[in-house]
Amino acid sequence: MDREFWMELLEEAREIRRREADWAYIDMQPPRLRAALRYYVETGDFRTAARLAGLGVEEFLERAREAKIPLVL
Amino acid sequence: MTEAIADTSFLIDWARYSRRDLLWRLFDVVHLPESVLAEIYSEGTLAWIVDGLASRRMALFTETDDVVDLARRIVSLSRALPARGVDLPEAVCLAAGLKFGYVVLTENGGAVMAPSFLNELSPVKVMRALDVLHALAQAGHIGLRDEVARYQVETGHRFAKRDLRRLGLE
């Protein structure tokens, strides 16, 4: 796949995360987790998001699933 | 022998799939870097890994100094990627892919894109779950449309329409 395909794919992935996220649930979370979930929606960067949340990677992705944020790629 | 190396994002997603052992139809051995294993904690994922290690379908990959040095260089080079960089655990997978010819299994956007953007990594073959399902379908092991639907339901993963169109599924 060429570079343009990947860039468009990343943008579509961001749109899917934004659309499917349960924003009411996210807004109810403690500040660190809330910020981390928002960062993850925008970037898809789960490892940095996990660090922001103070969680392990798999644990963070579990919390993202609870917030209805899918893994997309 | 066909060998792969998997990162955290691929493992925890694929482990939720009821037909996860289809992976062994494509790969004789899937290597797990110690840095990746350290990120896994859930019972379901660990149970699959334990089974894989016990049956020798999976193998622990201990990062040697030369692999870590190469991985650190990949992390540095990846800062030039337009979207996001590659972290050390994924970079270890890419380094092993370059050094040993392993297929890299990942869902990490930076790692997926890296061979398209960094000339040094162009020989590395990277596969996501969708690519694995596609390869299984091409080999006649599954029907792609049904299995893609099953994978999304069981794992909560969403495949992008651009990707599905590319495979004739949209």
Image: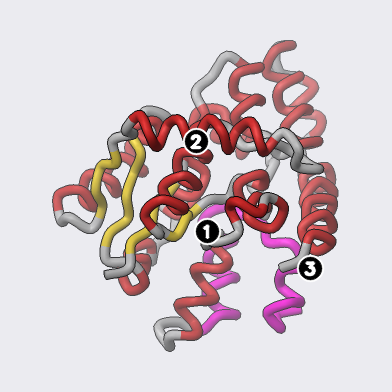
Query: Is A55 situated above or below B115?
Result: above
Residue occupying image coordinates x 85% and y 49%: A15
| For residue B38, side relative to residue B147 (left or right) | left
Distance between mark 1 and mark 3 Cα atoms: 23 Å
Q: In which quarter of the image is residue B56?
A: bottom left
- Is disc 1 surrounded by few (<14), some (14 to 19) or many (20+) residues within 10 Å? many
Q: Which chain carries label 3?
A: B
- Give the distance between the C-alpha atoms of the residues marked 1 and 2, in whole angstroms: 13 Å
Residue B124, disc:
1
The residue carrying mark 3 is B162
Q: Is residue B140 left or right of residue A62?
A: left
Give the numbered dot on residue B71: 2
Q: In this view, does A11 lie to the left or right of B25?
A: right
Label 1 vs 3, first from the N-terminus: 1
Quadrant in the picture for the N terminus of chain A: bottom right
Q: Residue furthest left?
A: B54
Q: Position of residue B52 (x, y in %)?
A: 24, 52
Q: Is the magenta stretch mostly helix, strand or loop?
A: helix
Residue type at mark 2 is Ala
Side (left or right) of A1 relative to B23:
right
Q: Which amino acid does label 3 sit on?
A: Arg
Q: How far apart are marks 2 and 3 (CA)?
A: 30 Å
Check if residue B169 falls in the magenta segment.
yes
Marks 2 and 3, the one that precedes in the sequence: 2
x and y percent of residue B141 in the render? 40, 83
Crowd rating for badge 3 (residues with CA inside 10 Å; few <14, some 14–19, many 20+): some
Highlighted magenta segment, given as a residue range: B143-170
- Which of marks 2 and 1 precedes in the sequence? 2
Indicate the position of residue B135 as horizontal and vertical percent values: 49, 76
